[in-house]
Image (cartoon, grey):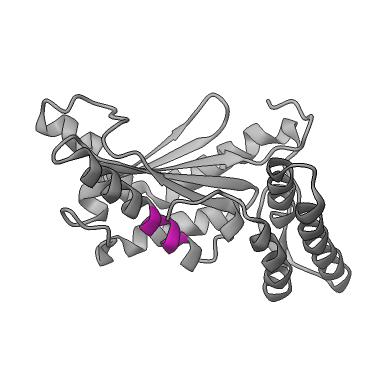
Amino acid sequence: MHRIPVKILSVVAATGLVLAGCATTDEFGNPRPMGETEKGLAIGAAAGAAAGALIGSTSADAGKGALIGTVGGAIIGGLVGNYMEQQRKDFERVLADEIARGDISVEQNPDHSLIVRMTSATTFDVDSANIKSGFYSTMDKIAGVVNKYGKTSLFIAGHTDDTGSAAHNLDLSQRRAGAVESYLLGQQVALQRLSSVGFGEDRPIASNDSDYGRTLNRRVEITIIPIVEEGSSVS
């Protein structure tokens, strides 16, 4: 499921999503009930995002504006570090068993983005892009945290080792990334926050000369990127 992260038509649908969801979040992304006034404001924001996307000067600017509208506003730069740090701690708490087994790793980058990395061996059968049913509970945990901290976009990347043809590996990596994206979408992660791509064998993180290295290279990574208010300094 390889596509441009934000589509103008998807923004139009955001108005309906706001009406259906009837929930909002505090500054740290935690859900709280939405009052009648807030419902009206949220609906207006979604409609405004759609209109902005249709009349924006560039598709990139329109897409960014639509995404910010979808998540209810960006994070003020000074709050980004705490927002993403709390999210990392929540991931490590709910995924403690998976991390201990080596099924999942969670890393935080200097720019505060997070990488949730899952091994293909635990997520998929050999040469398959169907998520194993035994991994559903782990995916549900990931979706739960992602939904709690809604002011982020998610870039899902599939990777393989160099066994087999490059064309086959590229296709497999794309389908696996798309499967993870589809699962998160099914768990109510907003469409506008999601994008996926497959890199095949082109971006190894270890040598393909050993079984261990090839195991590390067969992976799906979710990079979680904070949506920051324009012009804010990030700390």
- The quarter of the picture where residue 141 lies is bottom left
Residue drawn at (83%, 58%) of the image: 48
Q: State left or right for residue 59 relative to residue 170.
A: right
Q: Is residue 36 magenta?
A: no
Magenta segment boundaries in residue numbering? 178-184
Q: Position of residue 11 (x, y in %)?
A: 69, 60
Residue found 69% across the figure and 65% down from its top = 14
Quarter of the picture holding the N terminus: bottom left
Judging depth in this view, the residue of 194 and 41 nearest the camera is 194
Give the residue at x 57% y 59%.
191
Tell which residue pokes out farthest to the right in this image.
Answer: 37
Is residue 182 on the magenta stretch?
A: yes
Q: Is residue 36 above or below residue 218?
A: below
Answer whether residue 102 is visible to the viewer in this image: no
Quarter that holds the C terminus: top right
* Left or right: 37, with 126 as reference point: right
Asked whether residue 113 appears in the rendered view, the answer is yes
Query: In the figure, 91 relative to 143: above or below?
Result: above
Q: Is residue 66 left or right of 216 when viewed as pictured?
A: right
Q: For residue 226, which quarter of the picture?
A: top right
Along the viewing direction, whichever of 187 and 50 lies nearer the viewer: 50
Residue 142, given in percent of the width and then of the height, sits at 44, 54
Marks counted in the figure total: 0
- The overriding secondary structure of the stretch rendered in magenta is helix
List x then y, in percent, for residue 198.
36, 44
Q: Residue at x 54, y 66 (%)?
A: 188
Residue 117 horizontal/vertical position (percent) = 36, 41
